[in-house]
Amino acid sequence: MTLALIYLIGILVAAFIAYLLVEIVWDRTPKGALSEAYSPETKTGSRLQGVLSPLGIPVQKYAPPALLRKTQANLYWAQMAGKWHDWNAVQFTALQLATAVGGFLLGMFATQDVMMSLVAGYIGWAYPGMSANGVARRTRRLFVSQLPEFVQLVSAQMAAGVSMEEAIQRTSKSPGLVGQWMQKVLRQAQGRNLIEQMQREAQESLLPELIGMSVQIAFIRRGTAQQELMSQMAMSIAAAYIGEAEQRAEKLGSEMVVPMVIFYFVPFLATLLMVMAYPVMTNLFGGF
């Protein structure tokens, strides 16, 4: 049975390689979801991106759009933290596919066991995603924690009689992730509407707090009492962040029960039983 599975896997891998060759020779135009995420300019990237470029075509065609959108959002925030520069969703998914196949083949070569090889393949698929997701999650939390202060600074600038656009430009020079993000928006908004560019960038980030802020700023800009509304928005964002942090703290307490039992209570109980059982065993068997 194991030998038949090895032959079947070899045939599937050969067919996949043949498919890639056909795609490269006869169809080099990317199609499908997120076509803008795939760029022929991957040759200017790293050597690894160049090696993975043939996988971009099948990934572009057959990868679920939801997976690509989520991956692109994680890369967006990972790149804000200085990681995974010049990578896009298609390239990253191709990397995951390559590491999954490599892990599976390595598992088959090392263990000759299909289940262990599948586990190795899953680890190969999941590890790059865990790396990018961890950086993106920490960056999002830091960004959201700095967002209320940024909006409050914009409100303070507007209270001095400065227009909203000018207040945003001045506040973007402040240190922090939000200022860095706003500077990026300002660079891309040259000759465009700043608020509309902010909304486009927020949609690309898939961060609910940022999307909500950009929508509210668009409404505030059209009305009166802009400074008061900006101040209220800053307080609402801060309250939402505090509430979410409290929920995470409560959830963390319940999630820590199992690790505490495994890594603290069980070793403590085993040590206590060994101490108590040693005199009994000594009396019964005359020592060891």
Image (cartoon, rainbow, N blue to C red):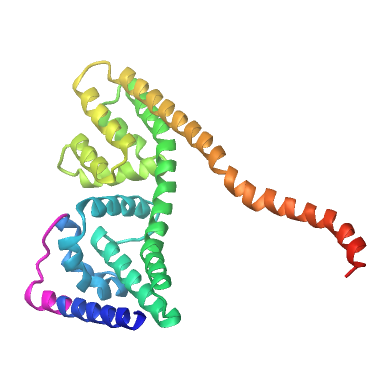
Query: Going by the image, does 155 lie left or right of 266?
Result: left
- Residue at the location (44% across, 36% down)? 145
Pick the residue in front: 107 or 152: 107
Q: Is residue 160 visible in this depiction of the protein?
A: no
Residue 35 occupies which quadrant of the picture? bottom left
158 vs 261, nearest the viewer: 261
In the rendered image, residue 23 lying in the magenta stretch gets the answer yes
Quarter residue 87 falls in:
bottom left
Residue 136, image x, y percentages:
39, 50
Q: What stretch is highlighted in magenta?
A: 20-33
**Is 211 included in the stretch rendered in magenta?**
no
**12 vs 155: above or below:** below
Spot occupied by residue 21 in the image (x, y as percentages of width and height): 15, 79
Q: Which residue is located at x 38 percent, y 28 percent?
A: 237
Quarter holding the N terminus? bottom left
Whether residue 35 is visible here, answered yes or no, is yes
- Nearer the observer, 43 or 38: 38
In the rendered image, the vertical position of residue 112 relative to residue 122, given as above or below: below
Residue sitting at x 30%, y 75% = 47
Give me the residue at 30% from left, 34% from top: 168
Residue 43's x, y, as percent?
A: 22, 72
Residue sticking out furthest to the top? 225
